[in-house]
Amino acid sequence: MSAVLVKDKTELPVMRSGVGLPRPDRFVGVKDWLTTVDHKKIGVMYGAAACFFFLVGGIEALMIRTQLIKPMNHFITAQLYNQLFTMHGTTMIFLGVMPLSAAFFNFVVPLQIGARDVAFPRLNAFSLWTFFAGACLLNISWLFQALNLLGVFNPIDGRTDIVPGGGWFGYATLTEKPFTGIGTDVWILSLQILGVASLAAAFNFITTIINLRAPGMTMMRLPVFCWMTLVTSFLIIFAFPAITIALAELLFDRTFGTNFFRVMASGDSAGGGQPIFWQHLFWVFGHPEVYILVLPAMGIVSEVLPTFSRKPLFGYPIIVFSGAVIGLMGFAVWSHHMFATGLGKVATAAFSLLTMAIAVPTGVKIFNWVGTLWGGRIKYTVPMIFSLGFVWMFMLGGFSGIMHAAAPADAEQHDSYFIIAHFHYVLLGGILLGLLSGIYYWVPKIFGKMMNQKLGYWVAGLVIIGFNVTFGPMHYLGLIGMTRRTYTYLGDKGWGPWNFVCTMGAYTLGLGVFLCFADMVWTVLSKKRNCGPDPWGARTLEWSLPSPVPAYNFSRLPIVSCRDAWWMQKHHGTPIEYDNADLSHGVHMPSQSWMPLGAGFGFFIFGIGIVLMSAGVPYCGYMAISGLTTTVFFIYLWALEAPGGYHLVVPDEATPPTPPQPSRAPASAAHH
C-alpha cells in the first residue's frame, strides 16, 4: 500500500502493519507520546526523565548531608545511609547525567547534521523505553522496602536491605549474598537493562552521524557536539561489555553459587574467588564512563562559547582530535583507582604515567576554549555563564585528579573525603554546569519559548556558589582524616563545623537546581511563544529551523559548503543551498509503533520476576520467563511490521528557496 498524503496526521485513514495490526499513527496526546518514533519527542522524554531523577538523586544527597550536619546525629539509620549513598551515586550517573546527555543527542544531533531523523527510529524508541524499565526497576526497590516495613513483603532470608546498599561501585565482598539481601539483585538487573538501552542508542547515533549527514557535510565540518556524541557512542560500545560481564558473573555468584568474586562459599570455607577481579572489570568500564559523562558536556561548551564570543571556535581540528584521544586513553588508566590494592611497582608506575598523560588532551581543550574567548565580543548570557563555570570547575577537578597520579598521594587520600570533593568537582562542577548550559541554550529551540533569563542568573549564582561551599571544604575534611561512607562521627574530630558548612552549601545548590527545573516546567507549560528561530545568533544548522522544529525537520535537505554554515550565511554571504527534491508528494514520515514500548515493558517484568524469585516469592520464576517472552515477542512483531509511513504536506512558507544548480564549496570556505 502506497503512503498516504495528508496535511495533518489526524487525517490519516486506519492503516495496518505487516502483521495486520492497526498503525498508531493517528494518535494524539498520551498515546502519541507512547508510540512515537520522532527523535525530538524521544529527546524531550529523555530530558524529562533525567530532570526527575536528578531531583530524586538530589533529595537522596540532601538526606545524606542532613545526617552529617552535626556529630553523632541520628536523622537516619546506618543501613538507610548506605542505601542512600548507593542509590544517589547510581541515580545521578545512570539516571541523571547519561539520559540528559541522551536527550541532547536525540534532539540536537539530527538537526545539526541536516537529517530528518535518526537512522533507526524504532530502535531509538526501544532505547528510551528500556531505559525507563531499568530506572523504574531500580527505584521500585524503595516500594519493596516500604512494604517490608509494613510487614507485607518479607524476603525468604529475612534481610531488610531490599534497596541496594553496597555502593554504586558494588565492590566484592560488599555484594556477597551471605551479607546482602535482594537490593544487590535489583542493582545488578537494573544496570544490565540500562546497559541494553545505552548500547542500542550508541549504535544508532554512530550510524546516524556517519550515514545521514547532509550533502557536503564532511566529518571535519561536523559541529563539535556531534563529534563528542560520536566519540561517546564508541566509548559506550567498548566500555559496557566489561560491566555487563562483571554483573553477569556477580549474579551467577549470588544465584548459582559460582566463585568468580566470592571469598566465602559456605560457612567458613574459602570460596576461591578473586574480589580484585571485580575491581579490574568495574574500572575498565568505570573510567571510560567518566568520559562518557563528560564529553557531551565538553561538546555543549564547544557550541556555547563560540556563539557568545562572536567568533569561530579556536583550533577546531585540535578540539576534535583531543576529544578522540581522551576517549582512547580513557581505557588505559583504570588501575589508578586501585593503587591502594598493591598492584606492584611496574603497574603502579605505568598507570601513574598514563594518568598524567591523559591530562594533556584535556588541557589542550581548555587552552582552545580560552583562545576562543580571547579577543571575542563576549556576551554574558545564562548559557555562557554556565559554560564558563564548567571550564573553571572542571579544571579544578582535573588538578586534584592529577594529584592522584602520584601513588603516595593517592594512598594518603584514598577513600577519604578528598576523593568525594575531587569527583564531584568533575561530575557536578563540570558536567552538571555543562548540561545546565545546554538546557538554557537549547530549550528555546525545543519549545519555542525562552526561559526566564533574570531567574537564570540567580540559578547560576546559587548553583556555582552552593557547589563550591559544599565540596570545597571536603578537600580539607579528607586531609584531616574524614573517610568516605562515614555514617556519623565523634565531636572531638574537628569535622563538625566544616560538615555544617558543606550541608548549608548543599541546600543552596539544591535550591538552584530546583529553581532551574521549575523554571523549565513553567516555560514549557506557558502558552506564550516568545522567541524566533535564532534567539542567540548561533552558528549551526538547527538554528536555521523554526522554533519549535517542524515534525519533518528539514523540508529540503541542506547542502553544506562550509563549517558553521548558518553563521556563514548570516555574516559572510555564503547561503545554505538545498536539494531539488519534489515536495509535491510531501515529506515521508515513519510510522509509529507499539513494539518498542512492549519490548521495554517486557524487560521490566523480567527484572521484577528475577528479584522476587530471589526474595523467595513463589512462582515468580514464571513471571521472569513471561517478561523475557514478552520482550522477544514484541521484537519479533517489530521485525514483521515493516516501516510503513505516510507523506506530510509541507506548507509553502516552510519550503526554503532552491537554486537550480547547487554550487560546490570553494576551497577557502571548506577550510573555514
Image: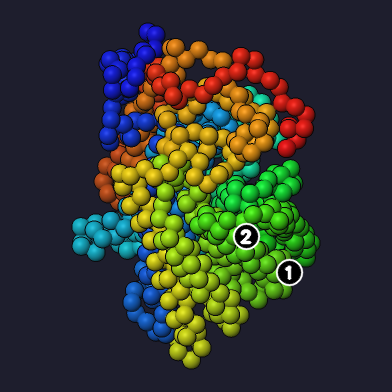
Q: In which quarter of the image is the N terminus?
A: top left
Q: Which amino acid does label 1 sit on?
A: Ala
The crowd level at tag 2 (other Cα within 10 Å; few <14, some 14-19, many 20+) is: many
* Furthest residue toward bottom: 492
Quick one: SS at disc 1?
A: loop
Can you identify the residue that label 1 sits on?
406
The residue located at (49%, 55%) in the rendering is: 436
User: Is residue 379 placed above or below 63 in the rendered structure?
Assistant: above
The residue located at (62%, 60%) in the rendering is: 391
The residue located at (62%, 56%) in the rendering is: 378
- The count of marks equals 2
* Left or right placement of residue 32 versus residue 282 in this view: left
Residue 397, image x and y in percent? 62, 65
Q: In which quarter of the image is the C terminus?
A: top right
Answer with mark 2 or mark 1, whichever residue precedes in sequence.
2
The crowd level at tag 1 (other Cα within 10 Å; few <14, some 14-19, many 20+) is: some
Say which quarter of the image contains residue 375: bottom right
User: Is residue 368 placed above or below 418 in the rendered structure?
Assistant: above
Viewer-proximal residue, 278 or 352?
A: 352
Quick one: SS at disc 2?
A: helix
The residue located at (41%, 29%) in the rendering is: 551
Say which quarter of the image contains residue 453: bottom left
Task: Quote the CA–CA distance across marks 2 and 1.
Answer: 24 Å
- Nearer the observer, disc 2 or disc 1? 2
Q: Which amino acid does label 2 sit on?
A: Val
The disc placed on residue 391 is: 2
Residue 642, image x and y in percent? 42, 17
Residue 161, image x and y in percent? 36, 62
